[in-house]
Image (spheres, rainbow, N blue to C red):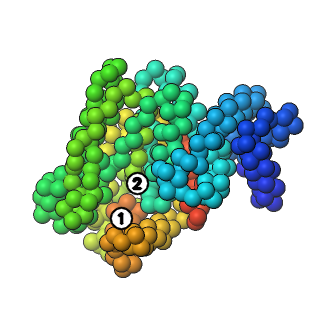
Amino acid sequence: MQTEDKQPELASKLRSLLHQWATGAAATASERQQMAELMLADTERAAVFGITPDTVDESLDRRLHLFQTLCPQFAPFCIQRLGWTEAIAAERLETFWNLWLPLAIQLADERAAMGRPLIQGILGGQGTGKTTLTVLLTWILAALGYRVCGISIDDLYKTYSERQQLQQFDPRLRWRGPPGTHDVTLGLSVLKQLRAAEPGQPIAIPRFDKSLWNGAGDRTMPEQVSNIDIVLFEGWFVGARPVDPSVFDHAPEPIITKRDRQFARDINEALRDYLPLWEQLDRLMVLAPVDYRLSQEWRRQAEQQMKASGKTGMSDAEIDEFVIYFWRSLHPDLFIAPLCQQPGYADFVIEIDASHAPSRLYCPGR
């Protein structure tokens, strides 16, 4: 990782090169050398993408070709699909180069080496950019000749009637979302079908409409797909694993009361049912806020934007109750932090700063 006093200088140099190349100008030998040095300077990011002094030239060639091929379409695509402005697209050009392009190339390479569909898990909460990442990876991979299917853990929710019965059995499951509110058997079946599909074989991908039943949501018509190369399976606890129940004896806030601790233990136990689902993942990345409490602020921003557009939204008090409910079920410090720190679970972590922008990329334990 480059030192902080060097970061502004390196960022300025990167922006200058990218804006030059975005015009379609050929890269000079001097510019290539500068970019190669920049790609190696962030040692954590270089480790994630396998960039070494021996491979940097080849990595640069591939990324530069893809960058200049897609750059003319980048802003129009993001404006249309993501609702960005021209200014936002210009600001995201560095992320396009530093993250989305090399990640798409890496996924394409792994898919080619596997000889079967690749399943990439993406763990990330509210505001971490799961949707943006999925949309852009799908677009870039299509340019590389790969068909992508995005699936959310939300698509695996139990039906409305099943969740009504579940709430009668356990009133603590008042909101959909925590472990126990999904049809794990359905998810396992779909992922296995995607991994082993024959060419042309249709597969029904479950979809969930959150607007049905006054916002309670329900299953809707499945999407039929075929010839999928890469699956992006995302959700707020995808890949999370049960922890030792003793941690709840001295758990962080808002797990305070005896009732809170019992709820956390029960959800922890329900998480075990999801392990066969995680075993279908070939890779896992974590989108981790620099402070998990940012999700509360981001949720407020999202609700305010909804209300400004004329839609109904939750009050700040309702948002706080909602967010705290999920912190009590799977507290980020207990379930997400270990994935970001211990080797063997996540392949890499994308750290997200307060402005929703990726600020660091690293492999846990290195």
Identified by mark 2, the residue type is: Trp
Discs 1, 2 touching: Cβ within 8 Å: yes
**Would you identify the image quadrant in which residue 143 lies?**
top right
Q: Is residue 330 visible?
A: yes
Picture residue at 37% right of the left edge, 34% below the top: 280
Q: Secondary structure at mark 2?
A: loop
Residue with the most extreme right position = 30
Please tell me which residue is depicted at 42% across the width and 73% down the height of the picture. 308
Query: In the rendering, at what x and y percent does residue 8 appear?
Result: 78, 58
- The residue that appears at 40% across and 70% down in the rendered structure is 309
Camera-nearest residue between 273 and 201: 201
284 vs 312, left or right, is right
Classed neighbour count for the residue bearing mark 2: other residues with Cα under 10 Å, few (<14), some (14–19), many (≥20): many
For the point 39% across and 66% down, which residue is it? 327
Q: Indicate the position of residue 210 as horizontal and vertical percent values.
A: 28, 57
Question: What is the tally of numbered marks visible in this picture?
Answer: 2
Q: Is 239 rendered above or below residue 125?
A: above
Per the image, label 1 sits on a secondary structure element best described as: helix
- Asked if 81 appears above or below 276 in the picture, the reply is below
Vertical placement of residue 142 versus 75, above or below: above
Question: Is residue 192 something one can see in this rendering?
Answer: no
Q: Nearer the viewer, residue 40 or 72?
A: 72
Instruction: Pick whichever of labels 1 and 2 is earlier in the sequence.
Output: 2
Q: Is residue 53 left or right of residue 169?
A: right
Badge 1 is on which residue?
326
Examine the image and state in which quarter residue 164 appears. Answer: bottom left
Left or right: where does residue 41 sit relative to residue 141? right
Question: What amino acid is labelled 1 in the image?
Answer: Phe
Q: Which mark is residue 236?
A: 2
Locate residue 56, reporting x and y percent: 74, 32
Distance from label 1 to label 2 (Cα)?
10 Å
